Amino acid sequence: MTLSSRSTYGWTAALLLLLLTALPVAAAGRAEPGAAEPAQRELTIYSGRGESLVAPLVESFESKTGIRVSIRYAGTAELAVLLAEEGTRTPADLFWAQDAGALGALSGEGLLADLPAHLYEALPDIYRSTTGRWLATSGRARVLAYSPQRVDETEFPESVFDLAAPEYRGRVGWAPTNGSFQAFVTAMRVVHGEAATADWLRAMQANDVQAYRNNTTQVEAIAAGEIDFALVNNYYLLRFTAADPGYPVDQRFFADNDIGNLVNIAGLGVLRASRRTDEAIAFAEFLLSHEAQAYFTGTVYEYPVRADVDPDEQLESFETLLDASPRVDLDALEDLEGTLSLLRETGLL
Amino acid sequence: MTDATPAARSRRAGRSNPPWYLLIAPAAVAVVMLVPLVYLVVRATEADAATLAALVLRRRNLELLGNTLLLTGGVVAATTLIALPLAWLVVRTDIPAVRLVTFLGVLPLSVPGYVMAYALLSLGGNYGFLARVLGIVVARPAGYWGALAALTLYCFPYVFLNVRASLAGMDASLEESARSMGYGHREVLRRVILPHLTPALFSGWLIVAIYVLGDFGAIALMRYEVFSYAIYTQYSGAFDRTYAAWLSLMLLALAMVPVLLEGRLLRGARYARTGTGVARSLRRIRLGAWKIPALFFVAVVVTGSIGLPFGILAYWLSVRPPWTELARVGQAFLYSAGAAAPAAISTVLVALPIAYLRVRHPSPLSHTAERLAYVGYALPPLSLALAMVFFSLRLARPLYQSLPLLVVAYMISFLALAMGPIRASLLQAPRRLEEAARSLGFSPFAAFVRTVVPLLRRGMFASTGLVFVVAMKELPIAFLLAPTGYVTLSLAVFSRTSEAMHVEAAPYAAAIVLFSSLFVGLLLRHEGKE
């Protein structure tokens, strides 16, 4: 017994040692605002965008400006809820979100500061907020993904409303719990009204539409043969084909101006509570720069927000995108509660 | 107190007052568990009655609850069917490579849920593994059975660890006397072994059940609609905290049903050895010809629970070899371990006095503290994290988004995980040993350290391992409470999968599995002689 208890203590001591060595390393990773040299300019970003995308950009920004950046990576939704909970006590200076709804919601709660007009004046309407409190850093179009093997050229619908027709029965996927789908439903409510949207949702359900978790899983379901069409954002498929050129899924727009081609955004807002707005605005300027815009489209296949940066060759041209996209006030997309109620009424959530 | 029969006297002695310092932990737990409850109630009272009624009282909630209960029941049953025989094989039989089999039985715990779901999903379909390699097209798992399979394959170790600790600590003389009274194998199993396993089974079931009630990731990938859907979409779809608080409270109420039920069922149960203090190891049963089916069973379980997820991780890693990422992976590991290791150790240190009080000094206080431990585990982690944000910003600003606060949040969330194995070991530790040590003049604390702690070794090791491995995978709490810039392995994984970059996420996911399994291996190696 003595022997065994001695080794228990030995083992506990070893664990504590491990802990003691791990702690300082861990603590070193924590940015201590103001703890370094007093002249150090700093910026804290809450990023709903992924690390592998963001980290190289941030390194470039740091080396250009000398501003030291600390980033919290998490889901856009979790960060939006966190920022709402933190309110004026937030340590964040800038929020970089995956969709307009999150920015609209925070703007609606009065947590975002007015941006200087020079940041967004040059952007097309689809990429900025009428409130001037947030702006797009890249565009992400809704498209129709399909299986080139199982879908005939004659079968392509003109409009997303056509997918409720009998020939698409059981062949279409969507993602009711997913933010980008919900933004699309919100846009449909804004443009076509509550009744038409509710009718479409019900007609789709009656047509045996298949529900998936998100965009990626819908693209995979087409490859797996479970569905032939899916309502997704444009860049996911391109991330699959980059790893596997033979990936058996393709995608296209509906007819011009159809609500199914909604252009949503990833974008940013500066927190009203921030005391480092100069640094935050410098970061916003950097993300709108030629370099960063070219990086977005080349790395993650999203649309640049500037006309003078060419979209990746697998994307449509800037003009084609503007023609295809419906005109929707992106600020109206913040009425998510209305969309959730509708999705609940129709039994989708 | 006028009753002076010897039995009553000994009963009173059993309920003697515990040393005051033992009350610190349960009192602290009671207070700390109230924190998230207070927060949720604060948020919930902001609701507007009509919206609330539309959200809470709708018919579909019943459907979703029904689905949730069906799935929970299914997973509890399926994990038991795997874990019970597996634990029996490694503790009571001469199955070859016992240590390896034990290790493999714990390992699935380290597999992140999304990896398990993806492993199952990528087998079938026109473009799946089977179709592309073998030319066989099978449907991809989906819905109830898909969710059941995915959850069972990485949750069964919770039951396995609990049952194994309990089986291993069981007193040989009980079983021997049962046999001497003429009971056959089957009757010994039914009348002696199974009743003694109940506390371990209950605590394993409770952990699995509450996990399934709250899980969203793997279930959503399998396209099965459950109640946690509603909570998740309320936070993520509407960026709303008010109605999400109501839904969280509903989920908590649901989860507390089995928690209270378990407490009631276990009350008054006695499982301590009656003979001399040291349990004699039982003779291992010779499997003989049964060795082949036994090994086949182990092989099937291991293939499903480890082969599949390791296979898909290996595939992702082969698409893009991770060598250039290794420095970042190493840094992320240090961050993960820097949170998970202190969380595991401190959680066990808190669980120990609570379990001890519950077993040695049963009282309403100790009972309540033990049950309250489950509140933290049953709360949706995002709600718990928001509660910590709410309170730390107001009361402990310097701690906000610091490592100690993250560790405390983990302790709240995972305390229940640590309770089971420790309690099961304690129930089997004979009180007489401590009494003997006391009579030799040791203080209660010294008596406890010298007599009980050595017997709790297995339970404490199992608890440490559980909390560590689960904390390595944890996501929503780290989202909100990790220090800014503190990118752990699981955050690194999420930050890539959220952009549909599974290949880029693979080195980090593999590191979670690798380091968790190394840790589990170390624990098993040091937990005691077989």
Image (cartoon, grey):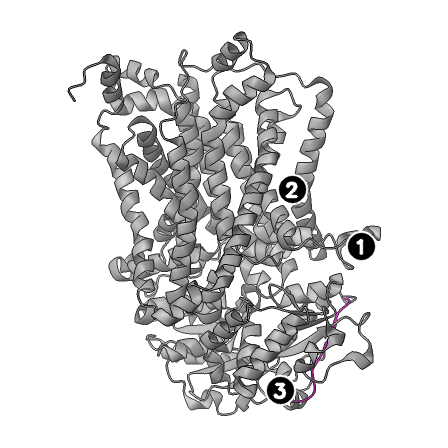
Circle 1: is it few (<14), some (14-19), or many (20+) Cα within 10 Å? some
Q: Amino acid at mark 1?
A: Val
Badge 2 element = helix
Residues rendered magenta in the picture: A248-258
Give the image location of residue A83, x and y in percent.
Answer: 38, 69
State the CA–CA distance, disc 2 to disc 3: 46 Å
Q: Is residue B319 magenta?
A: no
User: Looking at the magenta stretch, what is its main secondary structure?
Assistant: loop
Q: Amino acid at mark 3?
A: Ser
Same chain for the residues under marks 2 and 3 in the image: no
Q: Which mark is residue B306?
A: 2
State the CA–CA distance, disc 1 to disc 3: 38 Å
The residue that appears at 51% across and 62% down in the rendered structure is B60
- The residue beneath circle 3 is A325
Circle 2: is it few (<14), some (14-19), or many (20+) Cα within 10 Å? many
In this view, B356 is above or below B174:
below
Relative to B502, B172 lies left or right: left
Q: Are marks 2 and 3 in contact (CB under 8 Å)?
A: no
Same chain for the residues under marks 2 and 1 in the image: yes
The residue that appears at 48% across and 73% down in the rendered structure is A341
Image mark 2: chain:
B
In this view, A167 is above or below B467:
below
Image mark 1: chain:
B
In front of the other: A217 or B451 = A217
Image mark 3: chain:
A
Image-quadrant location for residue A81: bottom left
- The residue beneath circle 1 is B137
Give the image location of residue A259, x and y in percent.
Answer: 61, 84
Q: Amino acid at mark 2?
A: Ile
